[in-house]
């Protein structure tokens, strides 16, 4: 038996202790210590003896009618022999609050080495959406990429401000690709924000906007940043090779350049994130040694449920 109540300040310390215990010695480091921000609903599960059995908190963003609730890795935990049931009851309470405020897309980040938690959310109608993979800095040997470099078929260089228009075009092509089957995600981009972030990345010496030129034309892009959550790791964000030259090892060449950049700055690991349903990306990243450490599971609820 358990009671599900709203998360209030007095639960912060026991929730932090529970989080540290549950995630101790796990392979996917926590994003941050638990903090209560008040930016979304949160609930806790209390046992018969008054002990905290679990907590589940969401950060809500977006605009009315398109709110997205994100449950990050440090915003949930459950203990005991029946963590599955604890998650089920907590999500029942949390989802009710989210739908009431017009939030019909829910995501939750789960470490791969917590299969019981993954299964609990899959049983609650969540599906695999995003994958975060990790590998050591040393890449697998790829003779084909080396031959491409040696033949001069691809030239790698850091982007300059004059490249911004072409970079935006490549990013838009990537979004259009994600609209195809089996991903079927609408190509919706805040172009102003995209240009601003890419422009800032080009100017920031702590970030890398790496381009691949094929036959004197920019045909590939990879953006690399320090990872904000995993120590000593750099993360590859945007990564795209234009369709006309896909399969010619430009992606591998870009990855090699990204690894070189990261290594010279003292990073020991590389991370990459990709959409699970993107067959091209999934094969590429796994084929280049990236091992999944974190899933983002997503549930999209038909808004007619509140019509």
Image (cartoon, helix red, strand yellow):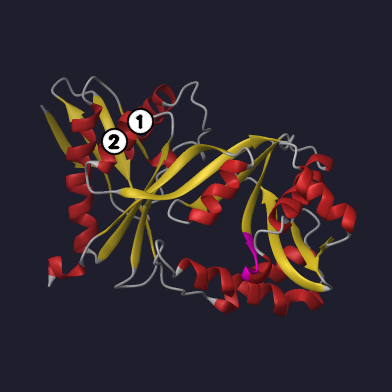
Q: Residue at x 44, y 70 (%)?
A: 179
Locate residue 158 relative to residue 125 in the image: left or right: right
Q: Which residues are magenta?
A: 239-243
Circles 2 and 1: CB atoms closer than 8 Å: yes
Residue 241 at x, y percent in the picture: 66, 64
Give me the residue at 43% from left, 40% from top.
73
Residue 7 visible in rendering = no
154, above or below 260, in the image: below
Q: Residues within 10 Å of mark 2 (few under 14, many from 20)?
A: few
Looking at the picture, tell me which residue is in the foreground, 55 or 284.
284
Packing grade of label 1 (10 A; few <14, some 14-19, many >=20) is few
* Quadrant showing the C terminus: bottom left
What distance separates the C-alpha of mark 2 from that of mark 1? 6 Å
Quarter of the image containing the N terminus?
top left
Picture residue at 66% right of the left edge, 71% below the top: 244
Work out whether residue 52 can be spotted. yes
Residue 265 in the image: state x and y as whole percent: 81, 42
The part of the image, by quadrant, that contains residue 35 is top left
Q: Secondary structure at mark 1?
A: helix
Compared across the picture, whether 8 is left or right of 32 comes to: left
Q: Which residue is mark 1?
A: 115
SS class of the residue under badge 2?
helix
Residue 226 tag number? none
Q: Residue at x 25, y 28 (%)?
A: 83
């Amino acid at each position: 038996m358990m009671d599900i109540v709203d998360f209030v300040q007095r639960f912060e310390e026991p929730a932090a202790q529970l989080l540290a215990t549950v995630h101790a010695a796990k392979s996917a480091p926590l994003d941050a210590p638990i903090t209560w921000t008040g930016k979304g609903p949160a609930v806790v599960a209390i046992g018969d003896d008054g002990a905290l059995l679990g907590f589940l908190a969401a950060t809500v963003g977006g605009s009315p009618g398109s709110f997205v609730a994100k449950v990050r890795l440090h915003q949930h935990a459950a203990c005991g022999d029946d963590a599955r049931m604890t998650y089920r009851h907590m999500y029942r309470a949390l989802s009710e609050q989210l739908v009431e405020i017009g939030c019909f897309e829910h995501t939750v980040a789960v470490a791969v080495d917590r299969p019981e938690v993954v299964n609990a959310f899959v049983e609650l109608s969540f599906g695999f959406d995003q994958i975060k993979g990790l590998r050591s800095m040393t890449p697998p040997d790829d003779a084909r990429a080396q031959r491409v470099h040696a033949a001069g078929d691809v030239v790698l260089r850091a982007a300059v401000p004059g490249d911004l228009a072409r970079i935006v075009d490549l990013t838009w092509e990537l979004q259009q690709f994600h609209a195809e089957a089996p991903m079927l995600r609408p190509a919706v981009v805040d172009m102003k924000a995209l240009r601003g972030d890419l422009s800032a990345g080009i100017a920031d010496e702590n970030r890398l906007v790496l381009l691949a030129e094929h036959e004197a034309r920019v045909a590939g892009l990879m953006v690399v940043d320090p990872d904000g959550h995993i120590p000593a790791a750099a993360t590859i964000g945007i990564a795209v090779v234009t369709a006309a030259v896909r399969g010619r090892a430009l992606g591998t060449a870009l990855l090699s350049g990204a690894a070189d950049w990261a290594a010279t700055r003292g990073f020991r690991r590389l991370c990459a994130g990709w959409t699970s349903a993107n067959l091209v990306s999934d094969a590429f990243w796994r084929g280049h040694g990236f091992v999944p450490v974190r899933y983002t599971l997503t549930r999209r609820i038909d808004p007619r449920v509140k019509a």
